[in-house]
């Protein structure tokens, strides 16, 4: 008994199949990628040496239209070959299956129509054209790419600048309402912050990102800073991330391991306000006492000035530089290959369709490498350490600016209690 198999893969939509998926002892496998030359070869071979069985995954792989599928089935079955579709209820030796063929052909027609639509979208992806659907706020749809909307892109730019300055998503959302009367939800604001389109990249529904397809609203450096702030804020309580006090969400009690909250105390008929840091969920009896906020802030600044340069000095910069250089070299290598493709098409080494597919894959790989590069710590840590080691630097900042720098470098601050006395232990992010 001789068994052969045939599979067809559209390179725009699918990945080539593994040759070991059939689950049968196969004498020969015919595989087509994009074109159907192997299908024609299969039909010629069957005329001289017809097999007993032909396996396919689905019948629609036998042609691009219902008519082509029907003609291929008729030719094969006239030669006495039993055609079996593994993912469909069809076997040409089963009379019941043959009665269902008409229904299968109807579903095949619908599937092929769907594939033609998806092929059209895939061809646009190869050309780095925008995906179908609503255009992101701040852009308009151009001929083959997004173009800036001059009336709304400044609003997006201001939103990002406010978020980078104050590290507060809710504050940035409120800022748009106050300044522009633009009302959006916090969820929409979060989508804006992580949307690749504002960084000059195009994202498609299956997660593929192609870099540098249109004019960005924020730079790569700003985008990397946004990502660092989002990662840092993800470890904080939602409202703590936008709290007005710079130590909010950073301090924990070393005695009861509870996070702390900023409490306000006022005296009747007096305007002065007193701030304290108090454990939010202390389980000890008596409870751990609150400590004046300003005392902890002053001690934090003193320790940060003394310890931060030492912490940064402990970072293995040669290894970090080597990682960055490796990623940068990989990006440069991919870009060199990308620049060579037009010449390969002109000399006939590659056909235009293959070159487009290769360019698409290269650009997605470059996007992935750029994302890895942006996730690494900033290269100017040493120069930053020199600035933040000066106490006056911290004292000249507003609370929101101080909050930004504290969260940039500090993972958390632990209060170490010693009876009525206390000290701080600062855990840096490095």
Image (cartoon, rainbow, N blue to C red):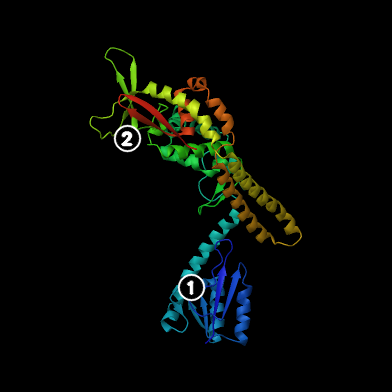
Along the line of sight, which residue is nearer the eye, 22 or 149? 22
Q: Position of residue 147 (x, y in %)?
A: 60, 41
On the picture, is 231 further left or further right than 267?
A: right
Labels 1 & 2 near each other (Cβ < 8 A): no
Q: Which residue is identified by label 1?
A: 105
Along the line of sight, which residue is nearer the eye, 255 or 130? 255
Q: Residue at x 57, y 57 (%)?
A: 122
For residue 160, above or below residue 362: above
For label 2, the SS is: loop
Q: Residue at x 45, y 37 (%)?
A: 232
Q: Residue at x 28, y 15 (%)?
A: 267
State whether residue 386 appears in this view: yes
Q: Earlier in the sequence, mark 1 or mark 2?
A: 1
Residue 19 falls in which quadrant of the image? bottom right
Q: Residues within 10 Å of mark 1 (few under 14, many from 20)?
A: some
Spot the residue most to the front: 418
Residue 45 falls in which quadrant of the image? bottom right
Q: In front of the other: label 1 or label 2?
A: 2
Q: Position of residue 36 (x, y in %)?
A: 61, 72
Spot the residue most to the top: 269
State the separation of the CA atoms marked 1 and 2: 65 Å
Q: Position of residue 163 (x, y in %)?
A: 48, 32
Mark drawn on residue 182? none
Mark drawn on residue 258? 2
For residue 92, above or below residue 183: below
Q: Position of residue 202 (x, y in %)?
A: 56, 47
For residue 175, above or below residue 196: above
Spot the residue most to the right: 347
């Amino acid at each position: 008994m001789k068994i052969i198999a045939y599979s067809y893969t559209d390179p725009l939509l699918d990945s080539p199949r593994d040759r070991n998926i059939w689950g049968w002892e196969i004498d020969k496998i015919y595989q087509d990628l994009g074109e159907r030359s192997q299908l024609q070869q299969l039909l010629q071979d069957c005329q001289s040496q017809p097999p007993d069985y032909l396996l396919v995954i689905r019948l629609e792989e036998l042609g691009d239209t219902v008519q082509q599928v029907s003609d291929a089935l008729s030719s094969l079955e006239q030669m006495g070959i039993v055609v079996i579709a593994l993912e469909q209820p069809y076997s040409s030796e089963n009379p019941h299956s043959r009665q269902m063929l008409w229904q299968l052909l109807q579903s095949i027609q619908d599937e092929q129509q769907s594939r033609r639509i998806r092929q059209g979208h895939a061809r646009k992806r190869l050309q780095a054209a925008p995906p179908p659907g609503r255009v992101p706020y701040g852009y308009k749809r151009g001929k083959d790419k997004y173009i800036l909307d001059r009336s709304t892109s400044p609003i997006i730019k201001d939103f990002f600048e406010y978020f980078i300055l104050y590290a507060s998503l809710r504050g940035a959302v409120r800022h748009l309402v106050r300044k522009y009367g633009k009302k959006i939800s916090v969820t929409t604001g979060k989508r804006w912050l992580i949307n690749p389109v504002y960084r000059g990249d195009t994202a498609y529904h299956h997660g593929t990102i192609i870099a540098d397809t249109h004019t960005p609203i924020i730079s790569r450096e700003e985008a990397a800073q946004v990502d660092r702030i989002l990662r840092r804020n993800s470890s904080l309580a939602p409202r703590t991330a936008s709290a007005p006090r710079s130590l909010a969400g950073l301090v924990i009690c070393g005695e009861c391991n509870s996070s702390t909250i900023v409490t306000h105390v006022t005296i009747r008929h007096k305007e002065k306000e007193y701030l304290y840091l108090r454990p939010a969920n202390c389980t000890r009896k008596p409870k751990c006492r609150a400590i004046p906020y300003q005392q902890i802030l002053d001690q934090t600044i003193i320790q940060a000035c003394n310890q931060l340069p030492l912490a940064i000095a402990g970072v293995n910069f040669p290894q970090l530089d080597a990682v960055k250089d490796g990623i940068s070299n990989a990006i440069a290598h991919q870009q060199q290959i990308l620049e060579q493709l037009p010449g390969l098409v002109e000399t006939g080494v590659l056909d235009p369709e293959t070159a487009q597919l290769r360019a698409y894959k290269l650009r997605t790989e470059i996007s992935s490498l750029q994302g890895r590069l942006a996730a690494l710590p900033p290269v100017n840590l040493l120069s930053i350490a020199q600035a933040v080691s000066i106490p006056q630097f911290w004292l000249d900042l507003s609370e929101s600016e101080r909050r930004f720098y504290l969260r940039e470098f500090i993972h958390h601050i632990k209060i170490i209690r010693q009876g009525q006395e206390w000290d701080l232990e600062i855990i840096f992010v490095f």
